[in-house]
């Protein structure tokens, strides 16, 4: 196979699909998405929990979230598919003075970036949102009612369907072997299914982004980090409650939603299981007992929860040193663009990412405020933008 395309996107997850959606919406229909697996979304997108929040500690992440959440609220109108957006809220619990100070500072920063509906709650008010949890050690909490959940698969389907309806093509079972360049920049992408002539390539390869970038001599500090999710059954919890985040160690949990309905299961997540630097996505059953024991300290009824080992899973974050994405032109190579390193925020920030990359390709600039902070050059310039709280 040999073909020509205006834009070749490497990676058929939700980020690549969003870039294709925004490009085709702007009139660039000659777009080809190259996916290494048999179907799109079989990497990190398929393992994501679907949490979305605007409660971040940096302006650029707040603004990325605001754009994206607004997009998710009108997703079905734009794509013909539901996003599954449920504004159940995120509840951040502070149990010491340092965490409480962070919540106050974060709320001020969030308001300055346009997020004005974050509420600071007392212990008693936080406990009313989920009476089943232990609250005697809580000093205060922040709650944003428009944070919540989406369906990663639903979002991927909607974006991909609409992009393809407007002319984008999808090539699956195609691994990128090399990317050729010439004096003008990117020239050709060679895959296991043929050659693709193009002057514009977008690296949206998720945890494999650094490997793809090295094919053109570009170094980006992106590394895989394994994270595990446990699906647990607990009859004592309600079907609807916010994402609850214990700031003492990052343990967080939320109700499981499938096909728009609460299943009665709870999703448990904790970074204690993390393993950096390899691409292993095996789920370790021993982690289930460990996290359920930890969960029982915040919600006593979870101590007796039963893990569904068949549906619990492991997936990969794509981490950068400052826990922010790398979005924009690759330094020193014309026609090569980066959409990488989301550090666990790829699904929730996919609409904003698609808009930024599409703008840069077609217009040379983007109007999304603060996006320039995500340039790859920041690591060489010492302009890191550390996100203080990563889940």
Image (cartoon, rainbow, N blue to C red):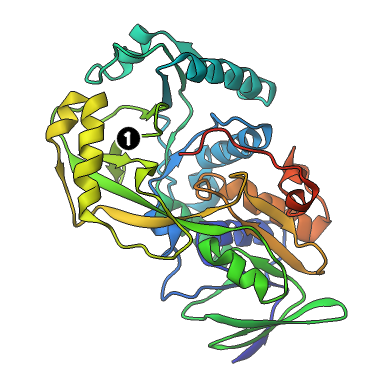
**What x and y, as percent, mark residue 158?**
48, 55
Q: Quadrant where the C terminus lies?
A: top left
Give the total of numbered labels: 1
Label 1 neighbour load within 10 Å: few <14, some 14-19, many 20+: many
Q: Find the residue positioned furthest to the bottom.
A: 1
Q: Is 298 left, or right, of 323 in this rendering? A: left
Q: Is residue 58 above or below residue 272?
A: above
Inspect this view and state whether residue 116 appears: no
Image quadrant of residue 125?
top left
Q: Quadrant where the N terminus lies?
A: bottom right
**What x and y, as percent, mark residue 32?**
62, 73
Task: Name the foreground residue: 68 vs 267.
Answer: 267
Q: Is 8 left, or right, of 38 in this rendering? A: right
Q: Is residue 63 above or below residue 191?
A: above
Residue at 19% of width from left, 57% of height from top?
A: 310
**What x and y, as percent, mark residue 270?**
35, 40
Task: Name the foreground residue: 327 vs 153.
Answer: 327
Q: Is 275 left, or right, of 15 in this rendering? A: left
Residue at 39% of width from left, 57% of height from top?
A: 315
Residue at 46% of width from left, 80% of height from top?
A: 173
Q: Is 160 left, or right, of 286 in this rendering? A: right
Image quadrant of residue 91?
top left
Q: Is residue 15 above or below residue 334?
A: above
Q: Find the residue positioned furthest to the right.
A: 183
**What x and y, as percent, mark residue 8?**
66, 73
Residue for badge 1: 253
Task: Name the foreground residue: 6 vs 387.
Answer: 387
Secondary element type, mark 1: strand
Residue at 61% of width from left, 66% of height from top?
A: 210
Image quadrant of residue 219?
bottom right
Inspect this view and state whether residue 313 appears: yes
């Amino acid at each position: 196979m040999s073909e020509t395309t205006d834009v070749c996107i490497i990676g058929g997850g939700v980020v690549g699909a969003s870039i294709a959606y925004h490009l085709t919406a702007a009139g660039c229909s000659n777009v080809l998405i190259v996916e290494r697996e048999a179907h799109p979304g079989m990497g990190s997108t398929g393992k994501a929990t679907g949490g979305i929040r605007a409660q971040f500690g940096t302006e650029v992440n707040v603004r990325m979230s605001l754009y994206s959440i607004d997009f998710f609220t009108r997703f079905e109108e734009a794509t013909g598919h539901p996003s599954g957006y449920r504004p159940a809220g995120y509840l951040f619990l502070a149990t010491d003075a340092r965490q409480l100070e962070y919540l106050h500072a974060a709320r001020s920063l969030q308001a300055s970036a346009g997020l004005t509906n974050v509420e600071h709650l007392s212990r008693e008010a936080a406990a009313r949102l989920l009476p089943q949890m232990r609250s005697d050690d809580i000093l205060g909490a922040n709650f944003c009612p428009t944070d919540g959940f989406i369906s990663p698969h639903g979002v991927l389907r909607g974006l991909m369907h609409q992009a393809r309806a407007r002319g984008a093509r999808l090539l699956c079972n195609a691994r990128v072997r090399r990317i050729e360049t010439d004096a003008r920049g990117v020239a050709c992408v060679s895959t296991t299914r043929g050659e693709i002539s193009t002057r514009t390539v977008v690296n949206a390869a998720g945890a494999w982004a650094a490997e793809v970038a090295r094919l053109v001599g570009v170094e980006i500090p992106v590394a895989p980090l394994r994270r595990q999710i446990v699906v647990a059954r607990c009859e004592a919890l309600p079907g609807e409650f916010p994402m609850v985040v214990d700031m003492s160690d990052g343990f967080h949990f939320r109700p499981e939603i499938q096909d728009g309905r609460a299943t009665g299961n709870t999703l448990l997540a904790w970074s204690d299981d993390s393993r950096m630097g390899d691409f292993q996505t095996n789920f370790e059953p021993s982690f289930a007992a460990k996290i359920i024991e930890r969960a029982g300290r915040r919600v006593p009824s979870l101590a007796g929860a039963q893990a569904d080992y068949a549906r619990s899973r492991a997936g990969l974050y794509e981490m950068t040193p400052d826990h922010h994405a790398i979005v924009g032109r690759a330094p020193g190579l014309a026609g090569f663009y980066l959409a990488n390193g989301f550090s666990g925020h790829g699904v929730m920030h996919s609409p904003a990412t698609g808009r930024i990359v599409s703008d840069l390709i077609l217009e040379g600039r983007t109007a999304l405020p603060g996006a320039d902070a995500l340039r790859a050059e920041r690591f060489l310039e010492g302009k890191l933008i550390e996100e203080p709280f990563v889940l």
